[in-house]
Image (cartoon, rainbow, N blue to C red):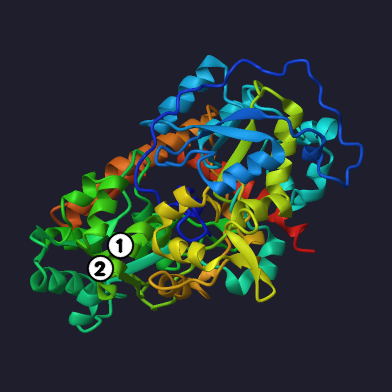
Amino acid sequence: MRKTRSMLTLLLSGALVFTAACSNTGGESQAPAKEGKAAPVAADPNSPGWQADTSPITFDWYLNFSWFPNKWGVDPTSQYITKKTGVSLNFIVPAGNENEKLNTMIASGKLPDFITLGWYEDNVKKMIEGGLVLPLNKLSEQYDPYFVKVADPAKVSWYTQPDGNVYGYPNASSSPKDYQKFGDKQTSIQTFVVRKDMYEALGRPDMRTPEGFVNALKAAKEKFPEVNGQPLIPLGMHDFTETGNYSLEGFLQNFLAIPMEKDGKLYDRYTDSEYLKWLKTFRKANEMGLLAKDIFIDKRPQMEEKISQGRYFAMMYQRSDFTAQQNALFAKDPNSVYIAVDGPANSKLDPPTLAGPAISGWTVTLISKDVKDKARAIRFLTYLLSEEGQKDMYLGEKGVTYDTIDGKDQFKPEVLELLNKDRSAFDKKYGASHTFWMLMDTNMNLQWTPPAVEPFKQLEDWTKGKTKSFSQFDQINPTGTSEEGIAQNKIAQTFSKALPKLLLAKSDAEFDQLFEKFLKDRQSAGYDKVKAYQQKKYDENVKKLEQFMK
């Protein structure tokens, strides 16, 4: 069971929209600049520790996302935060393969001051077990007791390791209390979308059944064989990786409302008859020439280019991943945008159970043992978690990016206009609305978030009421170099190799043979060990979450 399904859950509109990968900014973690200078402890645990020292300091901050394009200090929001706290940031971003870059740094035993990566990455465990990162709770005790005041106890408990320490803090995370408080506002980024003009020209076909789905793809290809001189791609999806395909795993399983557990026991969604029926539907679509070769080889940059050209008829894709392209289509022709519709469904046509905000969030941020100033680091992290830091990161500086308008702190009209029109340009010009999302609190931000506008509102609204919390299933997969971790990794890679073959199979009989082979390979890779591990972790998660529901 791959756990990437909650990777980007509940991101602010466009938080993931960036058009180009950023090359490494150079500056690896420098030699400690303030070694031996013990900053004074904030005597009052009720006052923010960062105020004790606002002298200039630059931290190196590694982001394990090659597509992150923004630099600190070029926009008024980051300039304002530096002026206020004294802290500047030098972002280090991998130019190519993220894991290669991070593995090299881990192997060297020397890391930049801050590290942000997906909570689901094996390297989180590697850094903790290798003693390369510092416990936030110990740093807080020593240098900034205010951390305890602003950190969410549920999130701290969730990320507390067996040694009793917490090393990372999540962004875009929702605790059970958050879910109770903001449940009706919770949205998912999982959508099935179609190009509005084409869909309407075809008479808005019902795509919930296998027959309706394939017929709609076929009709689209026949009616619109080309888009601006280039072949139409009937169906788009997330890229195939070395561990599988997000669209064809958790995403599709959620659309089919396949349960994650039955009577307290984890359910094997991969062998579910509804899931296999739909994988065979995709196989049939390929046999009919409705799956373009592109989808097997394209990565995100290629997809973004084709979305901006409007070349897909339908996509099983995260709405947060094509905001800039959606905006460009809207500017050219509002009818050429993508809209969310009811997509693949189970045979009862139950509504989907979309992944909503979960307690694990999307990323975790850690402080390295090589950090150049422990006190300033934990204090800056605490500031970012506090309502003051969240507001600064979201709204920016009063009078520059926002004002109190009609009694409410909100973006100035020209700032809001650019945010809605061109997210990438907004990031560079203003740097607000969590351009720097490393520790964003998506629930706290709701008080300042402007209402969604088209072409995004329809996509967002469609997910409301279909969104569920899957927190209890987070972090149940074994990672690292344990026996179970190695087995889990092998199983994911085995499925990633089997999946394209299943879609490219010449017949359902060949599909069945290939799937049987996958099940055998999965078994011999250590599936039973992995299953036992997952069940134990799931039971622990249920207990852990129960205490925060009281």
Tag 2–tag 1 contact (CB < 8 Å): yes
Whole-number angstrom distance, CA of label 2 to CA of label 1: 6 Å
Q: Secondary structure at mark 2?
A: helix
Question: Residue 39: which quarter of the image?
Answer: top right
Residue under label 2, please give it. 332
Q: Is residue 51 above or below residue 212?
A: above
Residue 109 placement, left or right of 189: right
In the picture, which quadrant includes the C terminus? bottom right
Residue 457 placement, left or right of 449: left
Q: Residue at x 74, y 51 (%)?
A: 152
Residue 113 in view here = yes
Of 346 and 158, the residue lying toward us: 158
| Kind of residue at badge 2 | Lys
Label 2 packing within 10 angstroms: few (<14), some (14-19), many (20+)? few
Q: Is residue 539 above or below residue 163?
A: below
Q: Secondary structure at mark 1?
A: helix
Q: Which mark is residue 328?
A: 1
Expressed as whole percent of the image width and height from the top left, the position of residue 476 reads 57, 46
Expressed as whole percent of the image width and height from the top left, the position of residue 132 reads 63, 23
Query: How many numbered tags mark residues here?
Result: 2
| Kind of residue at badge 1 | Ala
Of 305 and 274, the residue lying toward us: 305
Q: Residue at x 18, y 56 (%)?
A: 509
Residue most extreme to the front: 399
